[in-house]
Image: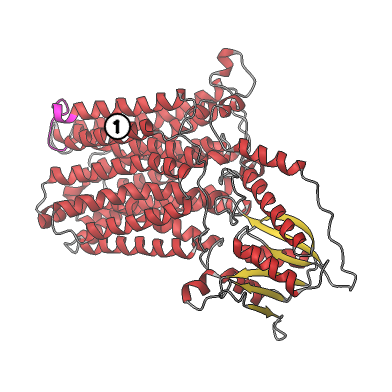
Amino acid sequence: MWRQGPLAGRYAPSAAMVILFLVPYLGLSAALQPLTPIIASQLHMSPQTIALTGGLANAGYAVGTVLAVQLAQLLPQRRLLLVYAGALVIGSVLAAAATGPGMFIAGHILQGLFTSMLLIASAPPLFLGFPQAKLRWTAVILNICIFGAVAAGPLVGGAQASFHGWRPLFWIVAGIAAAGLLLSLLTFQDAPAADRSAPRDGLAIGLAATGSVAAFWGASELFSHRFLDPIAVIPLIVGLVLIATLWIYEYTARRPLLTVRALASTIPVSGVIVAICAAAAATSAIALTATILAPHYSPLHLGLLFVPELVAAVVTGVAFGAVFSKRLIHYFALTGMVFLVAGVLVLRSSIPPTQTLALIGAGLTGVGIGASVTPALFLAGFSLRSAAIQRVFAILELLRAVAAFLIVPILLHFATTLTGLPTAAMNTALWICFGLAAGGAIAGISLYVLGRVAPPAPALGRWMGGQEPAWDSPPLLAALRGKTRPALAAASAAVVTAGESGGRLAASLGARPRRRPVGEHPNGAGPVLIAYDGSDLAGNAITEAGHQLPARRDAVVLTVWRTFGVGFVPEPGVQFDAACADDVRHAAEQTAEHGAALAESAGFRAMPIAVEGTPAWKTVVDKADEHGASLIVIGSHGHGKLGARLADSVVANIASRSDRPVLIVHAPAGPDGFRVRTSAPDATKS
C-alpha cells in the first residue's frame, strides 16, 4: 500500500484534478479549426495529414475508454491514474515542442488516448468516493467540463490564431496537464484492482482499437478524397462493422468487459439514443456553421459568435445540478432536445447565417447539448448498479466519441467538397442535423411510451450502495409484449461483478462472534481509539500501545474506508470490487476485525468498527469524539524527509485538530525498536 498524498480524500482538489484532466484535449479538439493552416505551414504538414492526425487522436480517445476498463480490472487503479497523467503530460509536451510532423502526430494521439483513460480512471471515483451530498456537484462539474470545454474551443482557437501562432496554446495545455499530474500525486490514495480474476478480453480491445482506427482513418481521408474512393470508404465501413461486432460480442459474452447486456432495457436504451443523436447533431451543426462563416470573419470574430454556446452550456450544467436527483431529469433531457432542434433550425434559416442568427443559434444549441447529452447518460447510468460505473462510462463514451467525432467529417465532406462552400448541399447537411435531433427526441419519447415508463426519481442512496440501480427500468417495448415486470434485475445478472465476493465477506463476518461493546474504563477514562488501516505500521502501533498503556484498557479499533480510494489494506486473499460500497464496507469490517484481534493480543478489550468517511483524519477525530475516547493511537512513517511529512498529513491533521491526546507510533528506527511521541491537546486552541 503506497503512502497517500496530503490532499487525499478531499473533494475540492479531487474535482479540480478531473477538470484539469478533461478540459485540455476536449477544448483543444474544438479549437484546432482556425489553427490548422498555421500548424500545417510551420510543421510542413499537408491539410490531409492534419486531418488524419485529428482523426487518429479521436480514435485514440475512443479506444482508451475500453482499454482503461480492462486495465482497471487487473491493476491498482490509482497507480494507473498516475501513469495516464504522466503520459498525457508527455504527449502534450511532444505536441507543443514538435519540430516536425512525427512529434506532433505522436503527441496529439497520446493526448486523445490518455484523456479518455483519465476520464475512466478519475471520474467514477469522484462520483462514488465521496458522500452523496457531493454527487450533485460532480454532475455539474462533469457536464461543464465536457461541453463547456468543447464550447470554449472556437473562441480559444480564434484568439490564438489572431496572433498567428499555435504553440502558446499547446504549451498552456501542457501546463494544465502537468497541474493535473501534480494534483493526482497530492490526492493519491492507493486502490486495488477492481477484479483480478476478470478475464483478459483481448478480443474486445482488439475490436475497439481496430474498429476505431479504421473508421476515423476513413473519415479523415474524406478531406481530400471522394466518399466512394476505396482509401476512404473501405476503412470507414470496416471500422463501423468492427465497432458493431464489438457491441454484439459484448452482449453475448459470458463474462463481458462492457455492460452492453445490462443496458438492454427501456430507460438506458432511450438515454443512449438521445445522447448519441444530441452529440452528433450539435457537434455537426456547430462545425458546419463555423465552416460556412469562416470566409466572412476573422478567427477571433468567428469565435466570439459562439460565446453564447459556452455561456449556455455553463448555465445549463448548473441547472442540471438542481434536477439530476429528481424525476425532472427525464424531462430535462427532453427539453434539451427541443432546444437543440430549435438551435439547428435557426442556424440553417439563412446560409450563411447573419451574426444575430449565429448568436441565437449558438445559444440554443448550447442549451440543447448541455441539457440533453449528460442527462441522457445519467439516465443510462442510474439504470445500472453503480459498481459497474466504469464499464458504463466506457461504452457510453465510446459511442459518444463515435457520434460526436465521426459524423462531423462525413457531413462536412458532403456539404463542402461536392459543390464548394455554402450551397444546397450545406443546407441538406444541416437538415440532417435537424433530423438527428428531432429523431432522437421522438425515439426517446416513443420508447418511454412503449415501455410504460412512469418517470421516477432516482434512489441515490441505494444506487451509491453499489449493488442496486437507482430505479427499475421496464423491458423494451413492454406495452407491445404485454410485460410489466422490470427487466433490470435479469439484465444485471448477466454483468459479471465482484458482488459475490462481497456476499462471501458478509457471510464470513456474520459467522464471527460479535465483540462486546466497549464501556467506560474503571478509572473513569474513555476507551482508546486505534486507527487501523491493515498495514504493518498500524499493527506495530497497536503492539506499542499495548506496551505503553495499562492492560485491559477498552479500545475501539477503527478502519476508515471509502469507495474506489478504499483507504485500508484488505486481508490476504480477500477480493472485492472497489467501486461497490457494500463490498468495500465488508472488506473494511474484516480488516477492523483483524485489528481488534491484534489489540486483544496486545492486552486491550477491543471492539472493531468500520466507517465510511473522507477525509480520513476527520472521520478519526469525529469517531474519537463520538466514543469519548481518552486517547487516539495512530502509526506514522516518521521520517524527516518532506515527502514523508506530506504523506503523514493524516497523522498531522489528527494531532493538530483533535482536542484529545494522540499517541503517534513511528515506524521502527532500527533493531532497537520504535520512536514514540505523544501529542497532547493544544491548550491555546479555541
The three-letter code of the residue at mark 1 reads: Gly
Q: Is residue 140 magenta?
A: no
Vertical placement of residue 206 versus 521, above or below: above
Q: Quadrant of the C terminus?
A: bottom right
The location of residue 63, given as percent across then percent down, is 34, 40
Vertical placement of residue 591 versus 505, above or below: below
138 to the left or right of 169? right
183 to the left or right of 10? left
Residue farthest toward the bottom in the current orientation of the protein: 684
Reading the image, the residue beneath label 1 is: 211
Vertical placement of residue 124 versus 552, above or below: above
Residue farthest toward the top in the current orientation of the protein: 481
672 to the left or right of 440? right
Q: Residues within 10 Å of mark 1 (few under 14, many from 20)?
A: many
What number of labels is visible?
Answer: 1
- What residue is shown at x 19% (from left), y 53% (from top)? 104
Q: For the magenta stretch, what is the residue range? A: 222-232
Residue 335 appears in view: no
Vertical placement of residue 364 versus 189, above or below: above
Residue 650 appears in view: yes
